[in-house]
Amino acid sequence: MRPHVQHLALSQFRSHARARLAFDGRPVALWGANGSGKTNLLEAVSFLSPGRGLRRAGAEEVGRRAEGVGWRVAATLDMPGAVREVETQAHPGEPRTVRIDGKSAPQLDLARLIPVLWLVPAMDRLWLEGAEGRRRFLDRACLSLFPDHGEAALAYEKAMRERNRLLKDGSRDGHWYGALEGQMAEAGMRLAGNRDATLGRLMAAQARAETAFPAATLAIVYPEEPLPETEALFAQALERGRWRDMAAGRSLLGPHRADLDALWTAKGVAARDCSTGEQKALLVSLILANARALEEDGTAPVLLLDEVAAHLDPGRRAALYDEVCGLGLQAFLTGTEPALFAELGARAQYWEAAEEGGVSILQERSPP
């Protein structure tokens, strides 16, 4: 059995006042009307990874406001050779905390347990909107493959914020600039290296698979000048660009300016020019490629696929289920009706979500 979430307990998390669920590692199909709490459950699982979850919500946003006592998500993870206990919570006005096996831990330690990958409806416009969303999508993939990616990102962002503050203040302190630019260059090249390696892993995983989903040719691009090739050259470029950056009030060169470019390989069509259904298929392809790359490393991820069938025809929907089951992954899939999961048959567990008096109720069901 692949690593999976064995037990999940929620307390005062969005619409879930209290819930306890048990899973056996098979895909989990969850259906119910809009507003019944399906996505909230997936969001709770996404908090078993570092960051702000699949909705990018702050710790203060996810607790049930009616109670005002804070929220808690606890999970038992069935891992190779061990069972791990994870708990994350936040009290009103306080930041989110994490405990692993009963001991306090930084959020980034979650990346070294079970990687969590997700695809949600808000991502359907990934190829049409700004670069920030695509960069975030890429960095989630990087974090799953390279757990130190989060540490590099934090170090880079911290140094860049300090440099931007100096730029806005009009500081001429070359010594302080040099120290910060050295930190940006070191962490930035780690970020860029992880991103390049991730793109290579994703495209290789696509090439090795026989799948109903299209392969994407991926590239990292920059709006103005490309990122220098070495740490020393990056630091030098930052030094040369101080006056330009001072006029802009921010750093104009670095991995924070990167964008992810995707091309439907077989058609030679840019992702942004594809149809809505084709763009969805490309996203599914990349999530599956990410999962395959992790599986090849012996690290099976958990997939969160919210309303994934919305833009997939029945053939591709069945193919998705076959691929998830073929990889042996635990996937949480949501939809508005059980018929959307008919192709899964006995290969999945089934839960129904309903809303009663503003509170979500979850009940396990037999296969449809």
Image (cartoon, rainbow, N blue to C red):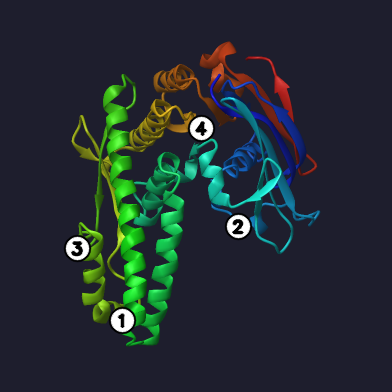
Q: Please report whichever mark, 3 or 4, sits nearer to the chain's N-terminal start.
A: 3
* Residue at (74, 60) in percent of width and height: 92
Q: Secondary structure at mark 1?
A: helix
How far is disc 1 from disc 4 in space, using C-alphas? 43 Å
Q: Earlier in the sequence, mark 4 or mark 2?
A: 2
Q: On screen, 198 above or below 339?
A: below
Disc 4 and disc 2: Cα gap in Å?
Answer: 22 Å
**Three-letter code for the amino acid on which mark 4 is drawn:** Leu
> Does residue 331 lie above or below 219 as drawn?
above
On screen, residue 237 versus residue 36, left or right, reads left
316 and 67: which is toward the camera: 67
Three-letter amino acid code of the residue under disc 2? Gly
Q: Is residue 154 left or right of residue 72?
A: left
Residue 246, disc: 1
3D distance between C-alphas at marks 1 and 2: 31 Å
Where is 224 relative to 275, above or below? below
* Sooner in the amino-acid sequence: mark 1 or mark 4: 1
Q: Residues within 10 Å of mark 2 (few under 14, many from 20)?
A: few
Give the mark nearest the N terminus, 1 or 2.
2
Q: Which disc is residue 58 wearing?
A: 2
Q: What residue is disc 3 on?
A: 225
Q: Residue at x 34, y 34 (%)?
A: 282
- Proximity of marks 1 and 3: CB atoms separated by less than 8 Å: no
Q: Nearer the viewer, mark 1 or mark 2?
A: 1
Q: Earlier in the sequence, mark 2 or mark 3?
A: 2
C-alpha span from label 2 to label 3: 34 Å
Q: Secondary structure at mark 4?
A: strand
Q: Residues within 10 Å of mark 4 (few under 14, many from 20)?
A: many
Q: CA distance from mark 1 to mark 3?
A: 17 Å
State which quarter of the image contains the N terminus.
top right
Q: From the viewer's perspective, tell me whether residue 194 is left or right of residue 332.
A: left
